[in-house]
Image: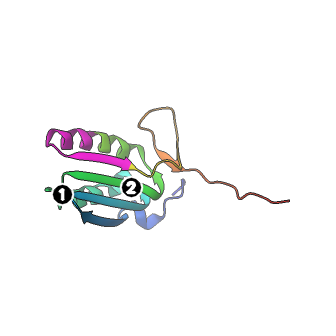
Amino acid sequence: MLHGAPLRSLFRPEIEEHVGGGRLVLRVKQAAVFSNYLSIKRRLARHRDVPAIEIDFAATRLVERTVMANLLDLKALLEREGRALSVSGLDDHGPMSSHPLSARKKVAFAPAVSR
């Protein structure tokens, strides 16, 4: 909550799911943290036959370090199964440390002031 994650998203993330053309896209909203990662993983388990998976974090405020590490492990597992995992939507998120798997927090931009 300190980093902008709403209380309800700590246990149940809001996820939009789109399946088509051999591709699954999960668009995670609000926050992706250790306590709600299992919800994301359950969504993936429903689609074991889909060869390409994208997890989109563009609508999140926070992606916690444990989720980043779990996704790296998941990517390796899916590759061994002949499937692919890509992560998108982190362009507006800044790392919270120098570690490559550090948490990512959406950077707030101040509105431009016209004079």
Task: Give the residue pinned by disc 2.
Answer: 56
| Residue at point 46%, 64% (across, down) | 7
> Do the residues bearing badges 2 and 1 touch, measured as CB atoms within 8 Å?
no
Q: Is residue 45 above or below residue 8?
A: above
| Residue 66 coordinates in the image, percent (x, y) | 36, 44
Q: Amino acid at mark 1?
A: Ala
Residue drawn where x is 36% and y is 62% of the image: 11
Q: Of the residues under marks 2 and 1, which one precedes in the sequence?
A: 1
Determine which quarter of the picture holds residue 50.
Answer: bottom left
Secondary structure at badge 2 equals strand
Question: Which range is magenta?
Answer: 73-87
Within 10 angstroms of label 2, few (less than 14), some, or many (20 or more) residues? Answer: some
Q: Which is more foreground, mark 2 or mark 1?
A: 2
> How far across and how far down the image is residue 51, in percent?
19, 51
Q: Secondary structure at mark 1?
A: helix
Q: Residue at x 19, y 44 (%)?
A: 78
| Quadrant position of the C terminus in the picture | bottom right
Residue 36 or residue 98, whichever sits in front? 98
Which residue matches tag 1?
45
Q: CA distance from mark 2 to mark 1?
A: 17 Å
Q: Residue furthest front?
A: 21
Please say whether residue 83 is one of the residues in the magenta stretch: yes
Q: Amino acid at mark 2?
A: Asp
